[in-house]
Amino acid sequence: MSTTEAPAPAPAPSTSRQPGRAERIARRVTEANLAVVTVLAVVLGLFVGAILIVVTTGQSFGGVGRAYGALFAGSIFSPSAVGHAISTGHGWSAAFTPLSETFVAATPLIFAGLGVAVGFSTGVFNIGGQGQVIAGAICATYVGFGVDLPVWIHLPLVVAAGAAGGAVAGFIPGLLKARTGAHEVIVTIMLNYVFLYLLSYLLVTAPLQQPGQSNSISRTVPQSGRLPHLFSGGLRVNGGFLLALAAVAGVWWLMQRSTLGFRFRVIGSNPLAGRAAGMDAKMATILVLTLSGALVGLAGMSTLAGTDFFLSTGYGGANGFNAITVALLGRNKPQGVLLGALLFGALTAGGRYMQAHTGVPFDLTAVIQAVIVFFVATPALVQEIFRLRSAPGEKKILLFTKGWAG
Amino acid sequence: MRLELAGVTKRFGSLVANDHVDLTVEAGEIHCLLGENGAGKSTLMNVLFGLQRADEGEIRVDGAPVRFADPGDAIAHGIGMVHQHFMLVPVFTAADNVVLGFEPTRSGGFLDREKAREDIRRLSSEFGLEVDPDAVVEDLPVGLQQRVEILKALHRDANLLILDEPTAVLTPQETESLFAIMRGLKETGRSILFITHKLKEVLAVADRITVMRLGRVVGTTTPAGSGEHVLASMMVGRDVELVVHKDDAQPGSPVLQLEGLTVTDERGVTVIDAVDLEVRAGEIVALAGVQGNGQTELAEALLGLTQPSSGRILLDGKDITRATPREALRAGIAYIPEDRQAEGLVLDMSIADNLVLDVHDRPPFAHRGARDLTAVRESGEHKLQEFDIRARSAEVPVGTLSGGNQQKVVVARELSRPVRLLVASQPTRGLDVGSIEYVHRRIVEERDKGVAVLLVSSELDEILALGDRVAVMYRGAIVGVVPPTTGRDRIGLMMAGAGVPA
């Protein structure tokens, strides 16, 4: 599928109540408040969206209900489709199509969100998601069409190539920062353009360009290099989603259980103390940006080998940037990133359905998304709106503990 | 002016920072407010200066109740404050800084710089506070910067000056001249509220002394009616040892040898200038000096945090000049950094994690890159006991602990490795008396175990109490190494750059 548009609104109840429980277990009471704020931010996002629907389309509140009903039906399940499947015993794949589409849209956001989150946790701001998505996808494409191998070896190679492409794109700013102090925000942003235009160039140049085509389209990855569908019957959800879930578990282990992740967190929180304790902050910077790039590169690979199978101009769309939002929403925790990505995936999938069935423009979902992020970033405002009590012992809710100068 | 605080109470949640504090400062009086860190002195001053609002109680100026909504109100009532951390614009001149916020102007709103300069000169001669009005503040030594702060308050017609820990950054001589200025101000009928935790200074300059503990006033006394020991006991609430008990050092072989060590910073300024120094096993070498004369840089160079430009560092005869921090730690250096929060601890991580910061990747705390959280936790709980760290459990974030307990975490971590050389930089800064006793005892214990100790401190009392030899630093160079029995005056002069005593 193409993920060129920004993700879209979700009927949030189930997805956003879970972070409350998960985080409460993980981090005790103080962050239960974070969860509450996040849930309320989603509520506020949908509320502002509702006003926009009324104002811009002139519909009544019934129209809002229909639009949000469609949003739900397009992302979670459609009661009528499920009813039909139950009564006839057929059409199960249609009943599961909305969820499948949500997972498909969430997959690259999970990978890229994880990548951005490990960087943030280490005090490194990787704004180069767009470039790393493209770098991963380019490498995966080359390996995809370039070699002819059985699937059991070809597919892992495609996956590895995607990670490697992103890793290189992350290693460059990491090395520059460690060696010269060049700020990674500047370098990663500029690299976005480098990879964007590199892609444009490659797409009109052999061997990447589809032979016999004058359009900017790449050659296609053959079946052996594609991520397999998880179900028969035309559902698009594929092995990429499982890989993404594995990445969530892997990143959680890395950050919470490994010595490397401990060093990352120490350096993210207080690099001076880390240095005085014998940690190599420069090496950690290089490693974490490389890892971050690799994860984001997998996002590019996952759309290529999972749904698209070829590259075109502007590949990857806003995934690289939405990853930053997802990491923010998930408070840089792997579990949080997963839930944030699912929410945004659901907004994307549901938004398309909503546009097709009710005429409410897809772009509304981008607005809802933006409003959610706005409120997540201003917890004091949410607290004021809902007159929430400050939890006892609650420390200031900080999204980032470090400034940009790091 | 006569200032009265009556029943001032300030709460932060369940914490009572000031509990019905009564305090009267008479006109023409130097009144000392004495108390440990956390006793509530700073909160009280913030209330007095309008930075925070009291929950209860009253402030009276010359008998009339006043309310300060912000520092502007306090200034309007004749209260001036010299903060511990100066509130000056470094790139402005002394004159500009003094008039800032109350600038004299000519018609059309133009600054009247000549008038500003004249104001300064007038104030300077009136109070004996010599400062060049055209000097750029960042080029002035700390003592003069402090004068600029005082001039600033006087320029705003302050009748009551609050001096918050003003001597922390001064040499003994600068401190003396500050006291002379304070006495001069007193002669003009101005009142001074002098906040400190240094007993000697209190006895030297105060007319009356109010002691605070745990947010309450414990009592008011006079220098004549008390002594160091009495004041210390009032401050701490129990009998305290003011002297560190230690036997004579039994120095062994040299552990640390510095040979012509030179460090240049990024701007090319020489911060350590050809330092030769030897620290032997079983002795404490105390590095005295006014802050900012290279002591910090020396400690950092030892640990490999900065790379020397020339010279050698030998540890047990082995060259560690180019060692990374990790190698330096493994070679047997323990390091108590001067700012525990900035360099010693990761405040949002647990005590247990902070205790293994240096060995987190070694058995038993990790195997093949995977951390053993059970081992980390158990070791943490054990260390809580061993080092008397007061915390609910080893799992609480270290940032929730008091300063003294935070420092104990640093000490516990650093002394849990095999140590050959202990580098302790300002190890008791900002600690309460109880914790200071504890840290001092630990340092002497390490010495007696045969560890070489390099103690960096800007507190002369600490240097003299702990040092077996005293090395004095000035502008990056060691001006002399003397026995601790050398007089304070002599060492004070050396800190100001004078040569070795004959």
Image: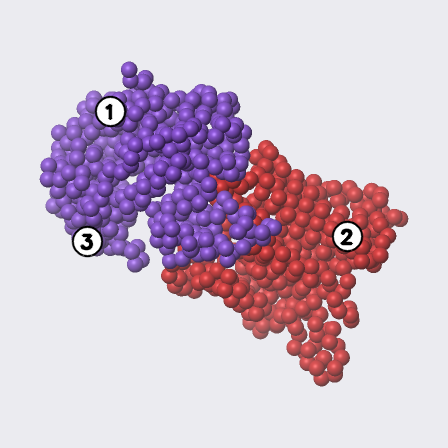
Q: Is residue A275 left or right of residue B205?
A: right
Q: Which residue is mark 3?
A: B20
Q: Which residue is mark 2?
A: A158
Local secondary structure at mark 2:
helix
Applied colour scheme = by chain
* B489 vs B161: above or below: above
Chain to which the residue tagged by mark 3 belongs: B
Quadrant in the picture for residue A168: top right
Does the image show residue B263? yes
Does the image show residue A326? no
Marks 3 and 2, how far apart at CA:
72 Å
Q: Amino acid at mark 1?
A: Gly
Mark toward the start of the polypeptide (1 vs 3): 3
Task: State if disc 3 and disc 1 touch (CB < 8 Å).
Answer: no
Marks 2 and 1, how far apart at CA:
76 Å
> Which residue is painted at 63% across and 48% down in the image?
A292
Chain drawn in red: A
Q: Residue furthest right?
A: A212
Q: Is residue B21 left or right of residue A112?
A: left
In this rendering, the label closer to the viewer, 1 or 3:
1
- The x and y percentages for residue B290 are 33, 28
Chain to which the residue tagged by mark 2 belongs: A
Q: Residues within 10 Å of mark 3 (few under 14, many from 20)?
A: some
Q: Which residue is mark 1?
A: B487
> Which residue is painted at 34% across and 25% down in the image?
B472
Q: Which sits in the foreground, B213 or A326?
A: B213
- The x and y percentages for residue A91 are 75, 77
> Which residue is painted at 47% across and 56% down in the image?
B377
Marks 1 and 3, how far apart at CA:
43 Å
Q: Is residue B437 left or right of residue B422?
A: left
Q: Residue furthest left?
A: B225
